[in-house]
Image: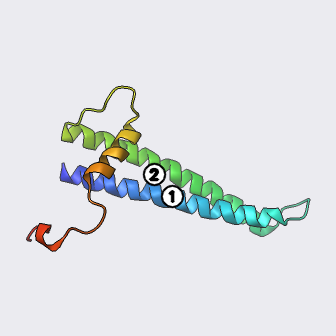
Amino acid sequence: MAADLIELLKARRAVVQASLDGERVADALRRYQKFAKPGQPSAHIVQLRQQQGAARQAGSQARQAFIKAAAAFVRTAGIDVPARVALERFVIEWLDANVPKGPLPRDEVAAP
């Protein structure tokens, strides 16, 4: 179960990172397109559009990996997902409620 939880946390981190990368590229693209002259787009704008496409694809792959990891974790942990609740939403809320945000205090750190 611990291995599935670790994979789930890694997948969630990848989703967050992909989302941030997509936002960063979209912001840059908006900034440059705002002042672009009509006609043929500049090479920089074309490059930003390619980066945006790659960021969208990476985000989709990260979400798919997260859902796969969430399904594996829920299965091995024996957690019942309520009806009419998306697995992704349920697992995110479960992680927020049950997994500590930062490093553990020194008293709670397991000895090697």
Residue 82, percent across and down?
31, 29
> Is 65 or 78 nearer to us in this picture?
78
Comparing 109 with 32, the one in front is 109
Q: Which quadrant: the C terminus?
A: bottom left
Against 27, residue 60 (above or below) is above
Above or below, 79 against 66 in this view is above
| Left or right: residue 52 compared with residue 77 | right
The correct choice, above or below, for 47 with respect to 95 in the image is below
x, y percent for residue 100: 26, 59
What amino acid does circle 2 point to?
Ala
Left or right: residue 71 versus residue 110 is right
Count of numbered tags: 2
Q: Are marks 1 and 2 in contact (CB under 8 Å)?
A: yes
Image point 64% across, 63% down: which residue? Answer: 25
| Residue for badge 1 | 18
Rounded to the nearest whole Å, what is the CA distance between mark 1 and mark 2?
Answer: 7 Å
Residue indicated by mark 2 = 62
Residue 84: image location, x then y, percent: 39, 26
**Residue toward you, 75 or 81:** 81
In terms of secondary structure, where does tag 2 sit? helix
Left-right relation of 54 to 28: left
Residue type (three-letter) at the residue carrying disc 1: Ala
Q: Residue at x 35, y 39 (%)?
A: 90
Mark drawn on residue 101: none
